[in-house]
Amino acid sequence: MLLLELVLMLLLCAVALGWVARHFKFPYPIALVAGGAVLSFIPNLPRFPFDPQLILVLWGLFITAVAVALRFVWVYPATHLPRLLSRKERENAPPERADPLRAEITDRILLAAPEGADFTPKAELLARLRHAAIKAERRELIRLWRANEISDEVMHHLEEILDY
């Protein structure tokens, strides 16, 4: 029963310290460390001897479980949701958005094509898509740069990468 009371007291202290940290607007890990330091000065708290190898194994299992949970919670939806959304977007895309993109892709293909090269429809489509992606990346870079989210050096470096 003593162990249960001690665990409940520690949980209550952690919640209270988190609330204090949020109220005074400083990071809660600092509050938890400071609270732990204060609790260490309380006399006659029971000590529980643990085998260090057991703690290491339990910590490893915890980290593995967190990584697996994150994989299911974040990576799986983040991978499949854009595919579903983009399919719906493609089906509902108005022609006034698609036509300028096709024209731009065609122009870029003609500029990048080696002389005398015959394009199959598949190769032409792939080249058009590649050039459209480059143009979209440039637009996004310019938007980020104008919003001061990236520096001039980063902007120039990424433009150089896109040029190749």
Image (cartoon, grey):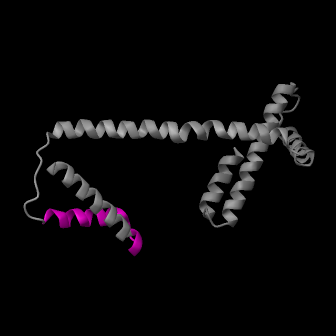
Residue that protrudes farthest toward the bottom in the picture: 24
* Above/below status of 113 relative to 44: above
The residue nearer to you, when weighing 161 against 130, is 130
Residue that protrudes farthest toward the left in the picture: 44
Q: How many marks?
A: 0
Location of residue 92 (image quadrant):
top right
* Above/below status of 144 relative to 76: below
Q: Which residue is found at the position 64% from the left and 36% from the top?
A: 80
Residue 79 picture location, percent across and down: 61, 37
Location of residue 125 (image quadrant):
top right
For residue 44, side relative to residue 147 (left or right) = left
Q: Which residue is found at the position 88% from the left and 41% from the top?
A: 102
Residue 26 picture location, percent across and down: 38, 70
Location of residue 11 (image quadrant):
bottom left
Residue 13 visible in the picture = yes
Q: Main SS of the magenta segment? A: helix
For residue 143, side relative to residue 15 (left or right) = right
Residue 25 visible in the picture = no
The magenta segment = 22-41
Residue 63 picture location, percent across and down: 35, 40
The residue nearer to you, when weighing 76 against 157, is 76
* Above/below status of 144 relative to 103: below
Q: Which residue is found at the position 18% from the left and 64% from the top?
A: 39
Q: Decide whether residue 58 is among the magenta residues.
A: no
For residue 44, side relative to residue 129 (left or right) = left
Residue 155 picture location, percent across and down: 64, 58
